[in-house]
Amino acid sequence: MSSFHPHLLERRLRVARTVVWGAAVALVLVFFRTQILEHSKYQLQSETNRLRQIPLPAPRGIITDRNGKILAESVTGYTVSLLPAADEDSLRATLRRIAPIVKLDNAAIDRILTRYRRTPYLPVNVVPSATFEVVSALEERRLIFPGLLIQPEPKRHYPDSSLVAHLVGYVGELTEAERAQRRFASIRLGGILGKGGLEREYDDTLRGADGVRFVEVSALGHVVREGGAGSRLAPVPGRALHTTIDLDLQRYIAQIFPAGHRGAVLAMNPNTGEILALFSAPGFDPNAFVGGVDPEYWRRLSENAAHPLFDRTIQARYPPGSTWKLAIAAMALKRGIVTLRSRMPIPCRGGLQYGNRFFRCWSARGHGDLALADAIAQSCDVYFYQLGLKLGLTSMLEDANGLGFRSRTGIDLPGEIASEFPTGTDYYDRMYGPRRWTSAVTLNLAIGQGENAQTLVNMIRLYQMLASDGRARPMYLAHPPSPSGAAVNLGLAPDQLAGLRQAMISVVERGTARGAGRFGGSIAIAGKTGTAQNPHGPAHGWFIGFAPADKPEIVVGAIVEFAREGPYVAPLVTRVIGHYLGVDTTVASHVRIVLPNDTAPHPTQLLPALPGDDSTVTPLVPFDTTTPDTTDMTAPADSNTPPPPADAPRAPRDR
């Protein structure tokens, strides 16, 4: 039968119709699914190819002092970024073309590519803080750089720079490790958050919420225009943070703190717990961290032997020296072991024989027969050796732990470390072995040496209790912490507190110069010096004081490393107190500080002296200028120094 037979042709026609109709139905179904059922999916893909998402960082909230002066603010800066490239090679090629204009070296290009690998779907930041000259040069060449994006962004600025560095902290990009924390899970990689100080502690308050905008790009990746109406979500600025800091006082401390020295100063209101100033030296420039820290600057900071990133107010431990004697006195008074008029059985003749050891007093000539109040004023070691033995090691450890000398204060700053102090006698069993230590450790602890290392902020808490009603106030910079646990209390009667304050009193006297301040030319300052023994070099000097002594308004403590003696630090603290209370020492022709006589053995120029200021430190009574024998003097300086043998004698020079 012929292939053109009508029957065969009809069959072929039916098959062809079936195929055509089947194909048509299939096409209709596919078109229906694409255009109707999956319309939103393909529209999103199309918009994604056409539009690019650009994050809009939120301005961080400002940080102000108690009087509204700016500690940290956000200012407008320019950021140069590149939109996501097709691949890493394309981005590298663009970066090499842009490098001569923005001054990128190979290391900088590698860092940019590393950021791109972490978030390949977001614009990669090339110059976080571009100058106007760089922005102008790039705008002139925009067409030759595909994906170039220049936009204004808020940048953090610290007007007082290093003066407030440890207090305020700094900001930086979120890292992958930080994003793993629940607190920062909602922040995009590359987002900005606080890295230290108040910036870190109150980051949730200051950060705000980032916005977003869309730009339309061409097939070559050039930005054509904004994405159109409704394509922008405005950022929500962070909330302002009002602190208790007195910026004028902070600046004054930075001005008079001895240049080139390490140390810290902390000032607070003893009645409220408000921190008035917090200064640590040396400092660093927090503005250098905005937009990413320069690797060379970071290397200098991290390799600096003075550790400028280290906040010495809350992160450094020192033997408290004679500043600790007030704690021993308070413990003994609370337990009724002594009164302010109590005397010890053995008068001070320059030292105390205990067993086969001779524990020296700082004064080789001795202080004679003293009552407790006089022993505090004279800082007599022999008196406190015996008082420590009367109190007993177990009671001393129990009371010291109850007063918080092994805990943190809870100040609202990140990174505070706990002070070091034995929890009980089992500490010595673990450290030295059972029956391999003697009660001679009590003598060391009684004068602030031995296994005792305190932070400045923790010692300030002790003197805050002495300056108020004996109760510890929560210390804070912005918001007082919620009460937790039993409140710390010295447990002393008002007359006992008044007696301790009287024992610490020194007087800042002014000459006939005008501007004597609102206290009639003299302010009674209660204070205590201390010397923290340091086997690595000269001793560290303490001074903690408060004023006016009868109704304290401010407590100030200072530690200056390698200051040799506490009395060298006392003038620094008294100047701070005088400045806060309105006594301007710069207008006085002479300033005389009368300190308790555990001080320098000769008149000493105030540290630091201001131009035209002829000032001296004058003792209450003549000093013994004989330098005591220090051949047996050993003491741990910090937590990195192994403790000496438990019964090793301490012979501190002066307190």
Image (cartoon, rainbow, N blue to C red):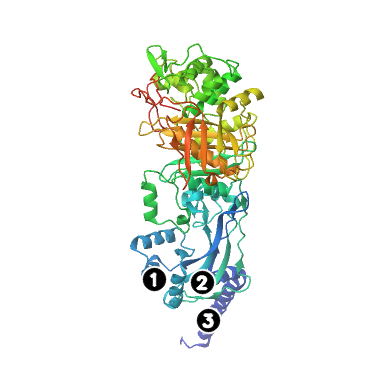
Q: Is 383 on the left or on the right of 358, as rendered?
A: right
According to the picture, the residue beneath numbered tag 2 turns out to be 49
Mark 2 to mark 1 CA distance (whole Å): 29 Å
- Frontmost of labels 1 and 3 is 1
Q: Amino acid at mark 1?
A: Ile
- Frontmost of labels 2 and 3 is 2
Mark 2 to mark 3 CA distance (whole Å): 41 Å
Q: Earlier in the sequence, mark 2 or mark 1?
A: 2
Q: Earlier in the sequence, mark 1 or mark 3?
A: 3
According to the picture, the residue beneath numbered tag 1 turns out to be 101
SS under mark 2: helix
According to the picture, the residue beneath numbered tag 3 turns out to be 16
User: In percent of the image, x 41 and y 36: which residue is there?
Assistant: 563
User: In percent of the image, x 54 and y 21: which residue is there?
Assistant: 374
Residue most extreme to the front: 512
Which one is in front, 558 or 100? 558
SS under mark 1: helix
Q: Which mark is residue 273?
A: none
Q: Amino acid at mark 2?
A: Asn
Which one is in front, 164 or 504? 504
Q: Which x, y percent locates residue 341?
A: 58, 17
User: In percent of the image, x 53 and y 79: which residue is there?
Assistant: 15
Which one is in front, 42 or 294? 294
User: In percent of the image, x 39 and y 49: which residue is there?
Assistant: 301
Q: Is residue 172 above or below residue 469?
A: below
Q: Amino acid at mark 3?
A: Ala
SS under mark 3: helix
Residue 443 seen from this side: yes
Q: Is 93 on the left or on the right of 21, as rendered?
A: left
Q: Residues within 10 Å of mark 2 (few under 14, many from 20)?
A: some
Q: Is residue 391 above or below residue 78?
A: above
